[in-house]
Image (cartoon, rainbow, N blue to C red):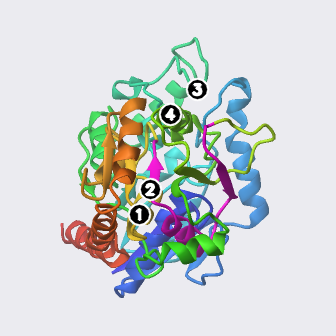
């Protein structure tokens, strides 16, 4: 079986890391997997670029051209209209099956999918595939019928760019040989609710990780290496653009921390943030805050997770949430909101806490619950590691994909 994975990036960002781990996992169980990308950061010889760097850069710029008319947008939006002869690059690998991943930034235009000869599996790392161009809807449900009058574009017209993108998808993807993979139940529910994919077969396969890298180490040692205090209970929060992306929920964490301060936790807690640098104007959270900056290496992330007593992942929309699964693998309990992909990762009151979505008081209650009982905490840590080994180890994920591919090719 020859598998070709497609992804805009191989390492830059959470979606790229998820795609690369699928590729690594397949190769670890002797599947002939290759990885074709638009922008390559790794030195892996099994990862190849579809075109020269200059051409890829020009393609990204050209694809973004329609957005010049929508300057007020604040979220990522991908038109995916710029033409590409990608099928020629794919044919030289002669794959039996294509596994699409995050393919935006101009890499794979909407029209290209109908040109591919192989059966398609598409692992969705966000909501773009079934919307009119946004990557997360932020509560908008227009994708369940058709798009237009897009709130993220600040558009007042029904016939706007979002409707154009949605209609191009609806026309081009009518007869695809396509099977979708969702990393969580929440994501699968969104896909089934969409007008584009309501009749498309869907499987749920969580994102994997290298459990030999993301594993528990002694908290004292991790704190010493990161220069973190030994005498505090550490609350960890992190993501790409951790404090700037509203979807990641830092504003909700801020409010929950103020709630904890009012309840008398001020002398016990310290907040640790990765993915953002310290702001020029320090935030008054009622607790000391340590900023670790951007952590791009798995070993650095492992230290951060292992040093913490609890990881908070308060996203209001998330397809999965690899920071949560990585934290569990390092033996650190996690607090998340319900009704997101993160809720699949946490077993409530076993390895963390699931708060009602957007409920600040319940988020604070969850943090306190994890931290308050020092005798219970080692059991939460053990259960966290056990869940990660059982559900998120890379070989577990790879065998699930292998089974899916065999079924599709058998059909």
Residue located beneath label 4 in the image? 252
Neighbor class of circle 2 (other Cα within 10 Å; few <14, some 14-19, many 20+) is many
- Say which residue appears at 61% left-offset and 47% top-offset: 242
Residue located beneath label 1 in the image? 332
**CA gap, disc 2 to disc 1?**
6 Å
Please give left or right for residue 58 compared with residue 225 in the image: right
Neighbor class of circle 1 (other Cα within 10 Å; few <14, some 14-19, many 20+) is many
The nearer-to-camera label among 2 and 4 is 2
Residues shaded magenta: 285-314
Dot 1 falls on a residue whose secondary structure is loop
Please, is residue 282 above or below residue 289 in the view?
A: above
Residue 284 locus on image (x, y percent): 67, 35
**CA gap, disc 2 to disc 4?**
16 Å
- Say which residue appears at 34% left-offset and 36% top-offset: 196
Mark 2 in CB contact with mark 1 (< 8 angstroms): yes
Neighbor class of circle 3 (other Cα within 10 Å; few <14, some 14-19, many 20+) is many
- Say which residue appears at 27% left-offset and 47% top-offset: 185
Return the disc, 4 or 1, that comes first in the chain's sequence.
Answer: 4
């Amino acid at each position: 079986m020859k598998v070709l994975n497609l992804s805009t990036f191989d390492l830059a960002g959470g979606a790229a890391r998820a795609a690369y781990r699928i590729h690594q996992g397949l190769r670890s169980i002797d599947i002939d997997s290759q990885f074709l990308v638009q922008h390559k950061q790794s030195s892996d010889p099994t990862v190849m670029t579809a075109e020269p760097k200059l051409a890829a850069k020009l393609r990204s710029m050209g694809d973004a051209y329609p957005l010049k008319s929508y300057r007020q947008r604040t979220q990522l939006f991908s038109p995916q209209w710029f033409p590409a002869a990608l099928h020629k690059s794919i044919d030289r690998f002669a794959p039996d099956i294509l596994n699409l991943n995050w393919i935006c930034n101009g890499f794979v235009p909407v029209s290209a999918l109908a040109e591919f000869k192989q059966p398609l599996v598409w692992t969705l790392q966000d909501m773009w595939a079934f919307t009119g161009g946004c990557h997360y809807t932020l509560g908008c449900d227009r994708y369940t019928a058709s798009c237009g009058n897009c709130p993220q574009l600040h558009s007042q017209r029904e016939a706007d760019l979002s409707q154009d993108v949605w209609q191009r998808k609806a026309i081009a993807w009518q007869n695809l040989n396509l099977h979708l993979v969702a990393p969580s139940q929440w994501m699968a529910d969104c896909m089934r609710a969409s007008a584009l994919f309501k009749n498309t077969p869907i499987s749920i396969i969580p994102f994997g990780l290298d459990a030999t890298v993301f594993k528990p180490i002694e908290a004292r040692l991790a704190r010493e290496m990161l220069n973190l205090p030994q005498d505090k209970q550490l609350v960890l929060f992190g993501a790409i653009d951790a404090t700037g992306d509203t979807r990641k929920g830092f504003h909700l964490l801020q409010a929950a921390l103020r709630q904890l301060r009012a309840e008398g936790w001020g002398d016990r807690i310290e907040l640790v943030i990765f993915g953002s640098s310290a702001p020029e104007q320090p935030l008054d959270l009622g607790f000391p805050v340590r900023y670790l900056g951007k952590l791009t290496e798995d070993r650095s992330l492992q230290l951060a997770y292992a040093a913490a007593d609890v990881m908070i992942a308060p996203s209001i929309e998330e397809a999965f949430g690899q920071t949560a699964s990585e934290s569990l693998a390092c033996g650190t309990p996690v607090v998340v909101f319900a009704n997101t992909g993160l809720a699949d990762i946490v077993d409530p009151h076993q390895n963390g806490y699931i708060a009602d979505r957007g409920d600040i008081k319940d988020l604070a209650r969850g943090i306190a619950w994890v931290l308050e009982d020092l005798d219970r905490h080692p059991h939460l840590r053990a259960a966290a590691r056990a869940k990660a080994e059982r559900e998120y180890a890379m070989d577990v994920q790879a065998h699930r994909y292998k089974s899916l591919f065999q079924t599709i090719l058998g059909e």
